[in-house]
Image (cartoon, rainbow, N blue to C red):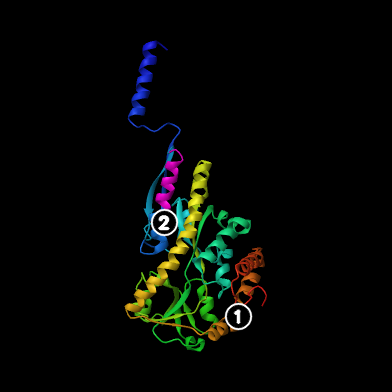
Amino acid sequence: MSSLAKFGFTAVAAAALAAGVPDARSETYKVTFSAAHGTQLPWIRMIKEFYIPEVDARLKAAGGKDAIAWTEAFGGTLAKVGGELDAVENGIAEMGFVYTIFEPAKLPLLAVTFMAPFGSDDALTVSRIMYELHQEMPELAGQWQRHKQVFLAALATDTDYILTTFPVNKVADLKGKKLGASGSLSLWAAGVGAVPVQGDFATHYNNVKTGVYDGLIAFTTGMYPAKLHQVAPVATRIDLGSMMIGALTANQAFYDRLPPYAQAILKDVGREYTTRIATLLTNVAKGFEQKMEAEGAKFSRLPAEERSKWANTMPNIATDWVNRNESRGVPARKVLTAYMKKLRDNKVELVRDWDKN
């Protein structure tokens, strides 16, 4: 190469760097993040306000060599409720919020909290337990791997209420009543003689208003944004417990394309999201309950003896769940045992030992 050619090449390279052209080794990854609900729900809003910007900040702090160009497909614009798992699995979305509560067939082991109700009513405790179990048990991580996904974060809710159009003072008051009970919650309703009807936060309001059902089982941070207390103003705290209802996941093929440090950032921010959203939901729930009461909702608490009656007279749904899954080679007993041990290790007062009777 002549000296003039060399000079020309160097000048072009220098000009490109001065103009801010990315280094050839850097890459911008296009990521569509799918969620069936919008940012009016706190756990979706936290994806927008914390998870995404925090990942960006940590990528920049790591040297800024790689970046992510995000597309926020929230509010069901890409996948509706129950379609998020498939969207991420098929690569339609690189990342997503997946409602495990609506996937009992495809993600059976993720239903463990629902199979052992009346446990901890603390979202931080349950979310931490479920996150830890994902790190400790290949059986749980394997549930996601079978659907070509990587687990990043867990969402456990604040404790459940029954929101109804009629007063609830005892378990017998629910007999024959139609209750909106999403996914696995239907087992709780049927266990006390209520009639479970499938629904979600997108349909609950109209379903109660039009008489499709007489009330629903749900948690405060989902109820208040949907204004459900306007149509079902009787709120009875039953402490069925905090439940894992969803997770943040990444498509496995997309995740594998990332450099190791970027993979670690997605996971590290996911772990922090797990803690932050649980803490937020606990704090927000208190404020939402005050607002609901100010707007006409009537709050009460199911007496302890009635709560115990509910827990101990319903069928052992955990045993049924274990037997059903074990017959198909799914290690539900191991997961249930590990979950119950975690509850006991965290000094949770159990109303029923689901793994023993």
User: Residue at the spot x=42%, y=41% of the render?
Assistant: 60
**In terms of depth relative to the viewer, which is nearer, 109 or 119?**
119
- Give x and y (percent) for residue 107: 55, 62
**In terms of depth relative to the viewer, which is nearer, 75 or 287?**
287
Q: Which mark is residue 295?
A: none
User: Residue at the spot x=52%, y=63% of the render?
Assistant: 127
User: Residue at the spot x=53%, y=42% of the render?
Assistant: 260
**In terms of depth relative to the viewer, which is nearer, 103 or 219?**
219
Q: Residues within 10 Å of mark 2 (few under 14, many from 20)?
A: many
- Which mark is first along the chain, 1 or 2? 2
Q: Residues within 10 Å of mark 1 (few under 14, many from 20)?
A: some
* Residue reaching furthest to the top: 2
Would residue 85 be visible to someone looking at this image? no
Magenta span: 50-63
- Give x and y (percent) for residue 254: 49, 46
State the CA–CA distance, disc 2 to disc 1. 38 Å
Would residue 68 be visible to someone looking at this image? yes
- Give x and y (percent) for residue 321: 61, 71
Q: Is residue 53 magenta?
A: yes
Q: Main secondary structure of the magenta part?
A: helix
User: Residue at the spot x=44%, y=37% of the render?
Assistant: 65
Q: Which mark is residue 315?
A: 1
Q: Is residue 14 magenta?
A: no
User: In which quadrant is the C terminus drawn?
Assistant: bottom right
Q: Which quarter of the figure has residue 228?
A: bottom left
Q: Amino acid at mark 1?
A: Pro
- For the residues carrying marks 2 and 1, which lies nearer the camera in this image? 2
- Give x and y (percent) for residue 341: 64, 67
Q: Amino acid at mark 2?
A: Ile
Instruction: Please name the residue that numbered disc 2 is placed on.
Output: 47
